[in-house]
Amino acid sequence: MTAVLFDYPKKAAFGRVLPKNKIYEHGSVSSAVRQLFVRQVEQIVWQHKLAPETVNLKASTAVPEIQIFSIALKGDELKPEVLRCIDLAISFPILFELRFDGKVKPIAAFKRPSEADSAKWVTSEYFDGDWVPADMPRKHLPMVFDLQALYGNLLMPLMPHPARPAEDLQAQVERMERIRLKQRELERCEARLRKENQFNRKVAINAELRDLKQELDNLTRPLSASGAAVTS
């Protein structure tokens, strides 16, 4: 997916290096995740704080601020466990920009306060764009009225499928996660079919495959404003 990079206001610049040990202090971090930080992360910079006083937009309980983190990598891979560890340590929505070898890759999870405990945050799976040149022209921030709308507009370019009519951000994210789940089920089913030798079992697995493909099509197919499927 082609990445979209945004031009954040100078007033929102924070530019503070975040030591890895400060992240470890905010939760129980396993030795395996610590090793991922050591092997994969060169430096973490808290690059921007998008808040009422820096972008002149109203905050909400769901989105009191938006943080932009820049992570310099030692290679072109970063395990999601590292990002989730940072997300758990910082009680605000975060958008990450991974950096390696003159390129940038935006990545983020949808993050919201827990309905069961407002002091805790719930984090979705991660969505990302492609690696692009670091000097790629950046887009101006979208014109919106509050931080919650801004957050949605920053996350939408990372979604693999566009929002449907009247579908809010949380509903869109939940549909993306169902799509990923069905894709994994489909891959496992295809692997079973390749290994199966009995004809009657192949027939049953093929029927299961057809059902999964139909479910996946229903989840990914664009809908018109009336809710009808859009045909090409």
Image (cartoon, helix red, strand yellow):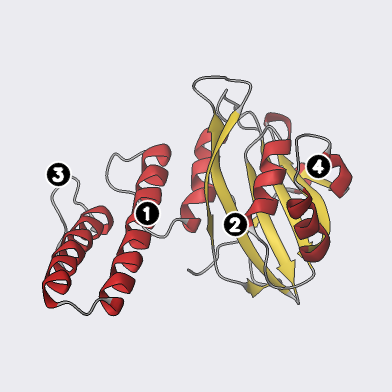
The residue type indicated by label 1 comes to Leu
Picture coordinates of residue 85, whole percent (x, y)? 70, 45
Location of the C terminus by quadrant is bottom left
Mark 1 or 3: the one toward you:
1
| Residue pointed to by mark 3 | 226
Asked if the residue at tag 3 contacts the one at tag 1, i.e. Cβ–Cβ closer than 8 Å, the answer is no
Classed neighbour count for the residue bearing mark 4: other residues with Cα under 10 Å, few (<14), some (14–19), many (≥20): some
Q: Is residue 193 left or right of residue 4?
A: left
Identify the secondary structure beneath mark 1: helix
Residue 18 showing in the rendered view: no
| Residue pointed to by mark 4 | 23
Mark sitting earlier along the chain (1/2): 2
Image-quadrant location for residue 146? top right
Could you tell me how far apart the alpha carbons at marks 3 and 4 are, in whole angstroms? 47 Å
Mark sitting earlier along the chain (4/2): 4
| Residue pointed to by mark 1 | 181
Could you tell me how far apart the alpha carbons at marks 4 and 1 are, in whole angstroms? 30 Å
The residue type indicated by label 3 comes to Ser
Mark 3 or 4: the one toward you:
4
Classed neighbour count for the residue bearing mark 1: other residues with Cα under 10 Å, few (<14), some (14–19), many (≥20): few
Mark 2 or 3: the one toward you:
2
Could you tell me how far apart the alpha carbons at marks 1 and 2 are, in whole angstroms? 19 Å
- Taking the view exactly as shown, the residue that stands out farthest to the front is 198
Does residue 108 sit above or below 55 in this rendering? below
Picture coordinates of residue 219, whole percent (x, y)? 26, 53
Classed neighbour count for the residue bearing mark 3: other residues with Cα under 10 Å, few (<14), some (14–19), many (≥20): few
Does residue 176 sit above or below 55 in this rendering? below
Mark sitting earlier along the chain (1/3): 1
- Residue under the image location 72 percent in, 44 percent down: 86
Picture coordinates of residue 170, whole percent (x, y)? 42, 38
